[in-house]
Amino acid sequence: MNTDHILLEAKSFSAGYRKQIVVDDISFTLHAGEVLTLIGPNGAGKSTVLKTIANQIDLISGDAVICGKSVQEQTEKELARQISVLLTDRITAERMSCFDVAAAGRYPYTGLLGMLSEQDKQIVQDALKMVGADDLADASFSWISDGQRQSVMLARAIAQEPKVLLLDEPTSYLDISRKLDFLCLLRKLARERGIAVIQSLHELDLAQRFSDKLLCIRDGKAQRFGTPDIIFSGDYITELYGIRNGRYDPLYGTAEPSAYTGQPQVFVIGGGGTAIPVYRKLYRAGIPFATGVIHENDLDYPAAKALAADLITAPSFEPIPEDAFRSACEIMMQCETVICTLEAFGTMNHANQKLRNLAEQINKLQTDIKKQPS
C-alpha cells in the first residue's frame, strides 16, 4: 500500500443549494490508508461537505478531486467505481433481502441487465461476512434492526470495491459494541486495502481514537485541519462546539459539566480514581463540595477540576506540601461532612491520612460512603 498516494483532495471548494453557499473554502488532502473525520456542531456543514465530494451537490467554486480527476468530470458509473457513499438517509428496500441490498454495490461492474456473475456473488458474500452480517443474507432488509441495516449498508459499500469510502454519521444507530466493531473494521479496510476513509462523527472520543486526521467545521468554514494530537489539545474542542455549561477534557475524551458554586458542604479526601463516583453523586444531588489534596497527575484530578467548588492540589510525583495540607484543613473545617474514599496511604499522600484522622477527631468523617446524598 502506497500511503503517499493522494486519493482525495479538496481544493478551496464552496458548495450549497440554489447557489447559496453553505460551506466555503474547504481544503484538505487524504492519502491511501488514511481515515479523515469531520467534526463540528450540528448544522455546521459536515454533511454538505460529504455530499459535495460525492457529487450530490454542485460545486459553486473550487474543486474536489478523486483519484486525480475532478468529480465534475467523471460519469456516474466512473465515480461509483472510485467512491462508495454511506449516508444517514433511511433506505427503503421493500421485498429485498440483505444479500440483494449488499449486491447493489456491484452495479458499477455489471452489464445493462445487472446480472451478477459468480465472482460478483462471492464478493458480496465476502463483504457480508466481513461486517458480521453473513447470517442475515436471506433475511428481509426491512425486518432487521437499525444497527444490522448499518452493517449491511457497509457491506454494500465494501462490495463496491471503492478507493474512497465516504460515510455520514455511520455509528448513529449502533450500540457501543457495534460502534467499536464498525470503526475497527474501517481502520482495517484503510490499512489492508489502502482505502481512504472520510466520515463525520458526533462521538468525539471515538473520532480522537480512530482518525488519522480531523477537519473541524464550524459555521460553514474549515476552522482547523490536523492530526488528533493537534486538534484535541487545550480547550479547542470546547471552543469549537461553543460549550457553555462545562468543558471537554481531551486527555480523557469526556465532557464535564461546570461545578456548582457556593460554600462547599462536603469535603472529599480521595485519590487514585476512588473519589470520582462520589464527585458525580454529589454533583447529581446539587451539593457543592471541596476535595483534596489531589496530585495533578492523579486519576481523580480531571473530574475534581471540573466538578469541585474548591480543589486543593499538589504537584505531580511530589509529597503533599505543608501549605496545601493547611489549605485543605481550613476548607475541611468549614464543611459539614467529610468523606474519605481511600483505604490505604503512601509516602506521597501521607498528609491525606492526617486529614482523615483530623476529620475523625472532629466527628465529621462519614465512614459509610453508601449514606452519601443520592
Image (cartoon, grey):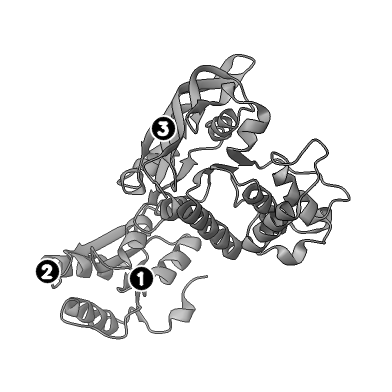
Residue plotted at (33% across, 60% down): 302
Mark 1 and mark 2 in contact (Cβ < 8 Å)?
Answer: no
State the residue position of label 3. Answer: 28
Image vertical order of residue 141 relative to residue 216, above or below: below
Circle 1 packing at 10 Å, graded few (<14), some (14-19), many (20+), is: few
Residue plotted at (60% across, 25% down): 74
User: Where residue 274 sits in the image (x, y, percent)?
Assistant: 36, 75
Circle 3 packing at 10 Å, graded few (<14), some (14-19), many (20+), is: some
- Dot 2 or dot 1: first in sequence order is 2
Is residue 205 visible to us here? no
Tag nearer the camera, 2 or 1: 2
Is residue 351 visible to us here? yes
User: Where residue 363 sits in the image (x, y, percent)?
Assistant: 32, 82
Residue plotted at (82% across, 61% down): 139
Query: Residues under labels 2 and 1: Cα distance?
Result: 25 Å
Residue plotted at (33% across, 71% down): 268
User: Disc 1 on helix, strand or loop?
Assistant: loop
State the residue position of label 1. Answer: 336
Using the image as rendered, state which of residue 293 and residue 309 is in the foreground. Answer: 293
Q: Residue furthest right?
A: 95
Tag nearer the camera, 2 or 3: 3
Image vertical order of residue 369 relative to residue 332, above or below: below
Image vertical order of residue 175 relative to residue 43, above or below: below
User: Disc 3 on helix, strand or loop?
Assistant: strand
Would residue 359 appear left or right of 17 to someone viewing this image?
A: left
- Dot 1 or dot 3: first in sequence order is 3
User: Where residue 76 sits in the image (x, y, percent)?
Assistant: 67, 29
User: Disc 2 on helix, strand or loop?
Assistant: loop
State the residue position of label 2. Answer: 321
Instruction: Give the residue type that dot 3 points to.
Output: Phe
Mark 3 and mark 2 in contact (Cβ < 8 Å)?
Answer: no
Using the image as rendered, state which of residue 255 and residue 101 is in the foreground. Answer: 101
